[in-house]
Structures are given as C-alpha cells and as structure tokens.
Image (cartoon, rainbow, N blue to C red):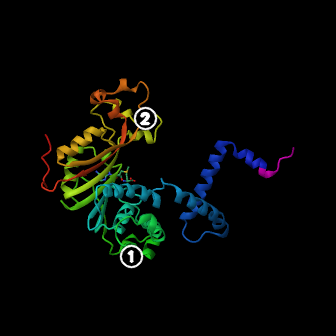
Amino acid sequence: MRFGLKQSLNLLLRFQPLKEFLHSFFLLFLEMESRIEGEFDDQVWQRLEPIYIGARRKLLQLRMWRYGPLFVWDNARPVFDKLAEHNLSLEGKVYCDLGCGTHHPYGTSAVMYINGAASTIATDLIDTDKKRAAEALYELLQDCLANPDVWHWSDLSRDEYLDRVQSFNFKALRVGDLEAGIGSAPLRHIIASIYETAIEPDSIDIMSSRSVLEHLLDFEVACNRLFVLMSPSGVAYHLIDLVDHRAYGSPKHHWWSFLAEDEHSSDDLCNRLRASEILEFFERTGFKILSYNAIAKAEMPVGFRKQLKGRFASMSNEELESIRIACLIKKPQERSVPPAPKI
Ligand SMILES: C[S@@+](CC[C@H](N)C(=O)[O-])C[C@H]1O[C@@H](n2cnc3c(N)ncnc32)[C@H](O)[C@@H]1O
C-alpha cells in the first residue's frame, strides 16, 4: 500500500518526541513573530487566526485560565453566597481581596463593586503586568455587560448594576491602559505585604482570600494585622489550602510530605498549620468564627502516618486529611485592639 504525504506525516506525528519538538518550535516562532513590532505578514496572520479562535474558545471555557471570567466567578461567587447565607450584603461596604494574585488583580474586586461594594482594595505582595490586567478586566466587564444574569447577584437594581459596569472606560481597558480604564471607579490595587501598614486600620468591612493564608509564615503576627485592618463587625471569608504546595510541581511530593519534615524546618512557602490550629489562632486574636468547613478531604498515602514528625504525629486522621478549609470570621464590634502577640 502506498502512503500519501498526509498519512506519512500523521504517522510521524505519533512519535511523541518529534511532536513535542515541532510544537515547541512552532510556538517559539509564533512568540517571536508576535513580539516583533509592526504587522504580521499575510501568511502568519492567516495561520494564526484558527489558532486564535480555537484557543480563545477553549480558554473561555477553562476555569483555570487565570485571566478569564470563569476564574473570577469561581473566586467571587462563593464569597457572595457565604455572605448571603449569613444575611450579609456588600452594599455600601469596603471590600478587600487579600492576596489578589498577579494575573487578574482587579477581577474579584470589580465583581464585588458592580454588586454593591462602596469601594474595593485588591492587595498583594507582587505587582502585575498592568497592560495584561487591563485586558483581562476588559474581557470580564464585557461579559458582565453581555450576561447580567450570570454576574448580577445583589439587590442593586439592574440599572444601577449596569451603570456600575459602564462606569469603567472600556476603550482604555481594551488597549491595556489600566489607569484610564479604572477611571473614577473606587477600586484600588495596593502592592504591599500584609505585614506592612499600607492599608488603614479598621477600614475593611468585608475581606476574602483564596489560597493565601497558608503562605503567611508568621501566622500570629499576620492574624493580628488582619484583625487591625478589619472594621468593627467586619467579616472575612478565607479559603485556605493546607497541602504541601511542592506537590503541585513535583511528583516527589504529595499533599502531606511537609508534615514528615522537621517540625521547625520551613520551605519558606507554606506555614503547615492544620485546620484546628488556624481556628485557634483566629480565636486567640479575637475573631469570632461564624462558620467553618473542610471543603476538601483526601486520604493520606498508606503507611505515611508513621513518618509524621513532631506535633503532626499526634493529630487525628480527620485533622490531617482536611486539606482545604473555608472560614468565615468576624471582628466583634466592641474590640479594636488585638491582644499583644505571645512572646
Ligand atoms: C496562590 S496565590 C493566590 C492568588 C489568588 N488569590 C487566586 O486565588 O488566584 C497566593 C497569593 O498570595 C500572595 N501573598 C503571599 N504572601 C503575602 C503577604 N504576606 N501579603 C500579601 N500577599 C501575599 C502571593 O503574592 C500570591 O499572589
């Protein structure tokens, strides 16, 4: 049987290393071409078009796309639902997205604003690519405008919701001008560590964070800072990822590997606190726990219990196997000064 060119190429492409090599080569070529000032030549844009369309459609459906609307929805909606469960509303409140990340720093804040927050603060240690952040915000706000049923959650009237969406400068965002795009909308982005005093004390009415608190290595000091920042009666909803983060990138580690290392060692990435310890810190600082859930549980590898070190060895499986938790905490009305940290 004679093989045509197409069949031969198909067969060759089954050879994985060759496929990977061609992929990398092609992507490198495209990346270089995209970075060169000026227009694509005819052949390039024609090849790029189906890739752009296909990739864009896929990205828009991908919840893990960190610049995409679905990523923001997944972050913001559970906060909104949790507040609603406790009859709490965003209206007229100062909202803070703690550890907002570097990809889409304004995403969750913008959604909280169009749903009633008076103003917002997105804060993180690390700054962002402002042009990319503007484009991501443009994409999100377009979706909020086109699909109000998906994004309008609050009791604000539909007109007010739409006015808020349209208070952003879409033209400026589209071309990557973040400052002009935000315009006079009351959204701030503060680049600072939670340990610094960049945010005014007693100023945050509603705070949320996702996958941030496990990175606060001096948790006692951090908790005191959080307490100081919250306004009296302010509430915070924190999702905390209790796993060994090295497992995300290395098959040598699993979710619990760090619990078999010396109790006082640190990978400088995670504080290794378990759920009950975190709750204890919150309470000791003066927060009231309004709700607590282990939102993900998993079984430790068989035989791993024997390798646990220090205090982890005496913890129950129930405790160790809670790998993601959600806590809604409240700063009481009457106290505004947290207890001094224990020496
Ligand atoms: C895993 S990312 C989560 C980002 C975002 N919340 C999300 O869900 O995509 C953790 C973020 O916390 C920030 N972070 C870590 N330590 C911090 C600190 N001391 N103060 C403020 N932000 C911090 C990091 O810079 C990082 O952007």
| Residue 258: quarter of image | top left
What residue occupies the far right of the structure in this picture? 1
Image position, residue 249 (x, y; %)? 46, 42
Q: Which stretch is magenta?
A: 1-6
- Where disc 2 sits, the SS reads loop
- Where, by quadrant of the figure, is residue 264 drawn? top left
Badge 1 amino acid: Asp
Q: Is mark 1 within 8 Å of ligand 1?
A: no
Task: Determine the residue positioned at 61% across, 69% down.
Answer: 40
Residue 311 seen in this snapshot: yes
Marking on residue 203: none
Question: What amino acid is at disc 2?
Answer: His
Residue drawn at x 66%, y 67% as measured from the top left? 46
Asked whether, in this view, residue 236 is left or right of residue 256, the answer is left
Going from the N terminus, do you reach mark 2 or mark 1 first?
1
Q: CA distance from mark 2 to mark 1?
A: 49 Å
Q: Nearer the viewer, residue 29 or 106?
A: 106
Observer able to see residue 138: no
Disc number for residue 254: 2
- Circle 1 sits on which residue? 159
